Amino acid sequence: MKEKRIRIAKINPEIAVREIGDFIVNYLKKFNKDGGVIGLSGGVDSTVTAAITKKAFDNYNRKKPERNLELVGYILPSFVNNHKDTTDGIDVAEKLNIRYEVRNIEPIVNAYEKTNPEAMKSHYNKGNLISRIRANILSTKASIENKLVIGTGNKDEDYGVGYYTMFGDGAVHVNPIGNLPKRLVRQIADYFGFYEIAKKTPAAGLELGQTDFRDLGYDYYAVELVLEGIQQGFSRTELYNHSQIKDTITPQLKFSKFNNIEDIVDDILWRHKNIALSKQDLIHPPAAPINNLRYE
């Protein structure tokens, strides 16, 4: 019997950019905002999100509305960030012709030594602290300027394996590329002419020398294939032995912390259920029901 393929999404970049851009503009208008603020990391996700948003704002502003929409970029490096990421972020802002600021947050990070000294002993906790500091800066800037925080999380990272910091880079008002897997985010980066950024190795920028692959043990195309496979009705065992999964994951094993395909498939599914979905519940926490309330 011929093997059934795992179907993966395709897009027309021009149409996708227009659809996402219209969504952003309509969302901002709903809340009567003057635009958005975005953290520019120099990576592909923030670059694509900024490019889509700026294009949408420019198109909207040309219609001469009562108020123009503005996108502002904030580049917030600390000592763990590669200097190239900062210069790439600046280059993106200047190519897109958006107002931007560069603020080194190391003094703020160090100030937490007084209140959270235990966090400084762990790269993991300190990295998440850095992400939350950035989120605090962005949300405050947005509030002062009557703007919303434009999120940059993609489908694989945020909704696939939950690879983000709660109340850090996950603390946003709108997430324009949340339905795009990393593969398609790179395609849109090429569409905008950011070819080199599209090729960059994904890294959270929260620890020295950190990469997403080193943390996870696999790339985001593996995440996309496994989760699409599950959604399309493939069993876990079928995914272990599927040619698309094998062709994608086998070359990665020599560099991975995992020894076999089964462990990687299991880890992706575990992260999706226990991290990605759990984080979504925690971000929108339930209130305790009170059944004896009486109104008089």
Image (spheres, rainbow, N blue to C red):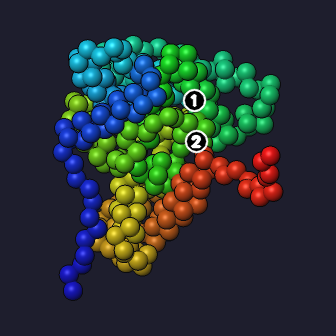
Q: Is residue 44 above or below residue 226?
A: above
Q: Position of residue 132 (x, y in %)?
A: 62, 32
Q: What amino acid type is highlighted by mark number 2?
A: Thr
Badge 1 amino acid: Ala
Checking the image for residue 74, the label placed there is: none
Extreme-front residue of the structure: 296
- The residue singled out by tag 2 in the image is 165
Check the picture and name the quadrant holding the N terminus: bottom left
In the image, taking residue 143 as reference, residue 87 lies left or right, namely: left
Q: Residue 167: where, in percent of width, then height?
A: 61, 38
**Residue located at (23% from left, 18% from top):** 63
Against 84, residue 159 (above or below) is below
Marker disc for residue 135: 1
Q: Which of the marked residues, 2 or 1, is nearer the chain's N terminus? A: 1
Image quarter of residue 95: top left
Q: Position of residue 195 (x, y in %)?
A: 25, 33
Residue 127 seen anywhere in this rendered image of the structure? no
Q: Is residue 22 above or below residue 90?
A: below
